[in-house]
Image (cartoon, grey):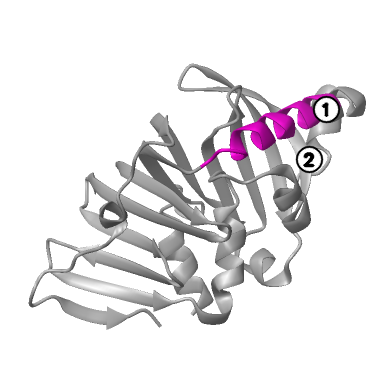
Amino acid sequence: MAISWFRTLSILSGVLLGLAAASFGAPLADVALDAALARLDEASLNFKGLTADIRKMSHTAVVNVDDADSGTIIVKRLRAHDTRIRIDLTNPRRRTVAIGGGKVQVFYPQSNEAQEVDLGKSRGVVDQFMLLGFGSNSVDLQNAYAVTMGGVDSINGEKTTRIVLVPKDREVFAQVKKCEIWISDKGWTVQQKFHTGGGDYVLSTYSRMKMNPSIPDAALKLELPKGVKFGKLK
């Protein structure tokens, strides 16, 4: 089941540990990494939620194919370790993903079909992925990942610091070999990349981000129409 629910979560919205030292020199890399994590900590203090446009691109290395989708994302943190997410992808394929309450739901409006995953024992693993940009702080990240400096990049014209994370948990590492997140000067994560092995990855880029807007709980719920064909992912 782990593979199926990870592929679903890859809509969110991924071990080059020596890259930072090779590119910048260890002391400069440490300073830049500490500064990026400090910005992340400051932004996480009052994080309650966000809305944004999302572009998700999945790369399959063996056939060198990119598969891209775009839409919107809503994130709301109800309390510690309880974050709800809704993603509405509209181009080129329509589907809605709702994550929260220990389950993942996916709805395909064109075929009127829905699928559901009960995360069960895997909920803790999913929580680790939730850390990658949605109100996470440096302590959370360093407890779950080996964190190193990646570099300085520009995403949608905005200066960002890229950090590299290698999962410490064996179950997580079995699904994702390495993650990268791009942190803006405001402390927001504007891009995530999940490397799933064999050269495959999922890249999610966020734009027109609005932090801590008023989000009603109803905006996060997936209301399924009558007559929907409903099944569970295995």
Extent of the magenta region: 31-47
On screen, 24 above or below 234? above
Label 1: which secondary element: helix
Residue 142 visible, this angle = yes
Q: Residue at x 76, y 48 (%)?
A: 139
* Residue 67 seen in this snapshot: no
Identity, as a three-letter code, of the amino acid under mark 2: Thr
Residue 225's place in the image compared with 61, above or below, is: below
The residue sitting at 77% across, 56% down in the picture is 143
What is the chief secondary structure element of the magenta stretch? Answer: helix
Residue 35 belongs to the span the image colors magenta: yes
Dividing the picture into quarters, in which one does residue 231 lie? Answer: bottom left
What residue did someone put label 2 on? Answer: 148
How many numbered circles are shown? Answer: 2
Q: Which residue is label 1 attached to?
A: 29
Left or right: 143 in relation to 224: right
The foreground one among 114 and 84 is 84
Where is residue 125, by image quadrant?
bottom right
Coordinates of residue 186 in the picture (x, y in percent) = 58, 24
Q: Which mark is residue 227?
A: none
Magenta stretch: includes residue 148: no
Q: Quadrant of the C terminus?
A: bottom left
